[in-house]
Amino acid sequence: MNSRLIHLTVNGKSHEVAVAPNAVLLHTLRDLGYTDVKNGCEIGECGACAVFLNGEAVNSCMVLAWQADHAEIVTNAGLGTMDKPHPIQEAFADAGAIQCGFCTPGMVISTKALLDRNPDPTEEEIREALSGNLCRCTGYGQIVEAVRLAAERLRRSSSSPASSLREAADDVTALGEQGPSQHEERGEPHSDARILPVSEQKEVR
Amino acid sequence: MTLPAFEVLQPESLQEALAVLAANPRVHPVCGGTNLIVDVRAGKIHPETVVDLSRLDALRGITVSEDEIRIGAATPIAEIERNQTIRRCVPLLAACCKTFANTLIRNRATIGGNLVNAAPCADTAPALLVLDAQVELTSASGARWVPLEEFLVGAFQTTRRSDELLTTVRFPLPPANALGGFRKMGLRKISCMAKVDVAVYLELDDNGVCRKAHIALGAAAPVALRAEEAEEALKGQLLTAEAAVPAKQGLTGEPLVQKTIEEAARLTAESTLPRAGSEYKRQVVYGLTRRILTACAKGGNR
């Protein structure tokens, strides 16, 4: 089984990486350091590994790395940063749609895929769009609310081109119930930490 | 976890892919990977070599002519679901695609893969069966068209030879007055496998009499099938909203339309026996068939 060099552009950064033919994109991305792409079920059930692959939201666990050769990939971390979060990411934080946070990167990807095509979705459309993403903490209520909030903010910002997305988002946040302390709390120092399988955790200990 | 080892071949053209298959009958084709990766992980299959078709643009796309629609085998389900012509002219197929797995899977899973995998619960099978679809099987030595009914022969079994690829799906363009519907029952509304699918395609004359009636069931038997006796019972019948409502609910039901629904349900019970859940499936087929026919009678979608 010979590895071969493949070329990936991830969040705008170009990578040449040698991968085996049986490697799946999920593992390749995590090995490259994109640990915001979460390894949940590895069989396309949970959506935690969702990324944009040439513009389409897909489960990276179901793509062979070789199939992604020369592809343009965008992960959750490619949409925004801690300092400048994407309005969708901000809406997830503001709506309390994040509990353990494991499903969030995939949820954000599916939300962006929805809002890019449908800026004003109904609740049914939101739930359908997130049907491939499982959350075991929140019960989905706040997640649906986050998508609705993100849609509203994005619509607002696109209708007032003079202000940046960030400004418009700030604007709405200031009107909401969430205080500025919410923003500070989001500076979670271990948000990029690797979560190891139980067996490996023992070895680390 | 790393997948068990296998080699991957990535042909640049269909001809090259067909040559690979002709030379090695044990090569496993892959495109969207939504079946392959799950099956390899589960240890259900152990391919030595897979041939990747995802780069073959010739296998992808939807073309509409005056009398038929052709869908390339490597077209993702999401693309079919979003296609404006499919939505307008074949809403039953668009409805089927909308119930298929979930949004992330639909962006990868292909129509050809769904048919070649031939799971008893393959959602596109009953929808395409009522549309009288044919599949094109291409090998290095030529191509042949096979009616979908003859292609699907059992659970995970088709008449595809190991040197052939399913390259195109085609079906007649439904006339403007055609009616139909697709209903799926699973564990939940979306992101699930079908416990039962029902697909219906009807052509009525100006007086509302059924001239063509196609009914297909998915997951009711080891292979998706047409409910031929139910179809016969419906032909020549006047379809009204009242006709499809069962008499036991105190409304007048047209006995022959009732018979259609009963026949579809009877076939389900017969085909699922002696497996568990056949009584459940029978009742679900009864209900789904009745709902689709009622919607059609009210001018439901094609």
Image: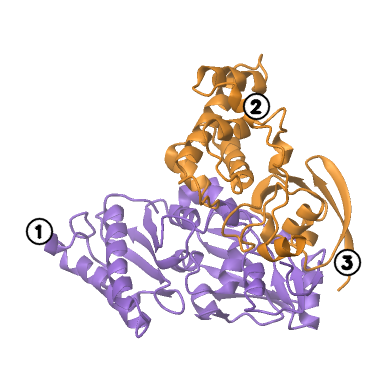
Chain colours: A orange, B purple
- The nearer-to-camera label among 3 and 1 is 3
- Numbered label attached to residue A3: 3
Q: Chain of mark 2?
A: A
Q: Would you say A178 lies left or right of A197 here?
A: left
**Between residues B230 and B111, which one lies in front from this camera angle?**
B111
Do callouts 1 and 2 mark residues in contact (Cβ within 8 Å)?
no
How far apart in space, not on screen, are marks 2 and 3 (Cα)?
Answer: 44 Å
User: Crowding near pointer 2: few (<14 within 10 Å), some, many (20+)?
Assistant: few
- Indicate the position of residue A43 as horizontal and vertical percent values: 61, 64
Look at discs 1 and 2 and give the one toward the viewer. Answer: 2
* Vertical arrangement, residue A79 with respect to residue B48, above or below: above
Image height of A126 relative to A24, above or below: above
From the viewer's perspective, tell me whether residue B27 is left or right of residue B233: right
Residue B288 visible in image = yes
- At 68% from the left and 48% from the top, the residue drawn is A51
B222 and B255: which one is in front? B222
Residue A184 bears which disc, if any?
A: 2
- Callout 2 amino acid: Glu
Q: Quadrant of residue B130?
A: bottom left
- The image quadrant where one finds the C terminus of chain B is bottom left
**Amino acid type of the residue that numbered disc 1 sits on in the rendered structure:** Gly
Locate residue A118: give its quadrant. Answer: top right
Dots 2, 3 in contact, CB < 8 A: no
Label 1, label 2: how many angstroms apart (C-alpha)? 64 Å
Q: Is residue B189 left or right of residue B167?
A: left
Residue position marked by numbered label 1 in the rendering: B250
Residue drawn 55% across the image and 20% down it: A172
B302, A149: nearer the viewer: A149
